[in-house]
Amino acid sequence: MSDLLLALLSTLMATNTPAATSNLIRQQTGITVSIPDPNDPAEREFRRVLELDDEAQAEVDRWIRENHAFAEQGGGLSNVELNLKILQRFDVVRTNYLGFLATHTNHARAYLAYASFLNDIGSEEESVGYMERACDLDPANPAAWNNLANYHGHRGDVKKSFVYYARAIELNPNEPIYYHNYGTTVFLFRKDAREHFGITEQEVFDKALSLYAEAIRRDPGNFPLATDIAQSYYGIKPMRTNEAFTAWNYAMSVARDQIERDGVHLHLARWNRDIGHYDEARRQLGIITNAMYQDLKQRILTSVNEKEEASKHPSDGEAPQEPVDAGPDGAEASAKHP
């Protein structure tokens, strides 16, 4: 749900009943939102299950941090002991979810929440049935379709993920993460996208980039999203140099601190190196001051100098390049997952 919709929802809930709030949101945004009644006994019970889930995950996170600190001092639990303790803690949450679902067999949000819990603890295969059940019970819930698409994009039938992301967007066209997820899956699984949509590889790139553009239009200040978009150009052949520079310059404009800006300067140096603008590549590297980037900065600078020298003696062959990041994935991904 977008920040704008969350703000609207909070304001309306303060002064209206759930039914009135749902109607007002539909009138003002065109989005249908089902607002549960907080006074409903089943809703109160479900919220308690969610609280138990949150408490358990926070406690497990604390155990991991504390055990890591103890291990550095020569103490702490073994990995086997810690994992057993974590599994026992999560079994309590599992029991609460299953107990609720046994009583409330048609509670779509509970199926979706339990599926998310299973994903969080690494039980992705077990989660898919609960996601499908959530979609069956509430086919107008875009989050359920997005989550199911995420599963198929990672471990299932990639072509199904295309259908499910499109369904999520149809139900809520204002949520940037749906476009981002959809675009990344199209970009990574180009062979599947070509077959599913009946388009060429260049058209696949165009489709992924158009989805990214929709995501950034709805969340224009999102630096991680902007860098994901810019990095995708490493994987596009032939190179779309002008578009890549535009994307990296946009990422620079929304960078939140000097660390992020220095990271963008590294990428701009790489692109300038690869198109033979060696002086500009060195200028970009010269801007970087953060110590965490010094080793990478030096490697890129060495490759700039080597490539420039090789360009003066083409008959000797070009010097090896320092590897570049290759989009969200690098090489084209396969529909077969590990």
Image (cartoon, rainbow, N blue to C red):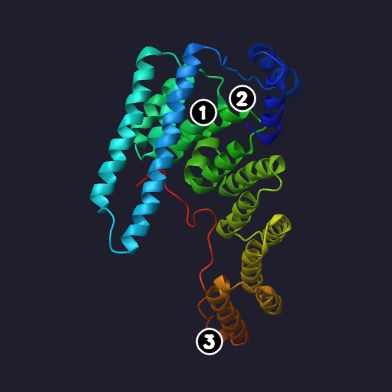
Foreground tag (2 vs 3): 2
Q: Nearer the viewer, residue 283 or 65?
A: 65
Q: Are marks 2 and 1 in contact (CB under 8 Å)?
A: yes
The image shows residue 283, relative to residue 46, as above or below, that is below
Q: Looking at the picture, how far across and down is residue 229, in whole percent?
A: 62, 52
Q: Looking at the picture, how far across and down is residue 313, in whole percent?
A: 59, 87
Name the residue: 76% across, 22% down: 28
Say which amino acid is labelled 1. Trp
Label 2: how many Cα within 10 Å (few below 14, some 14–19, many 20+): many
Residue 246 occupies quadrant: bottom right
Residue labelled with disc 3: 316
> Mark 2 or mark 1: which comes first in sequence?
1
Secondary element type, mark 3: helix
Q: Nearer the viewer, residue 220 or 256?
A: 256
The image shows residue 209, relative to residue 90, as above or below, that is below
Residue labelled with disc 2: 171
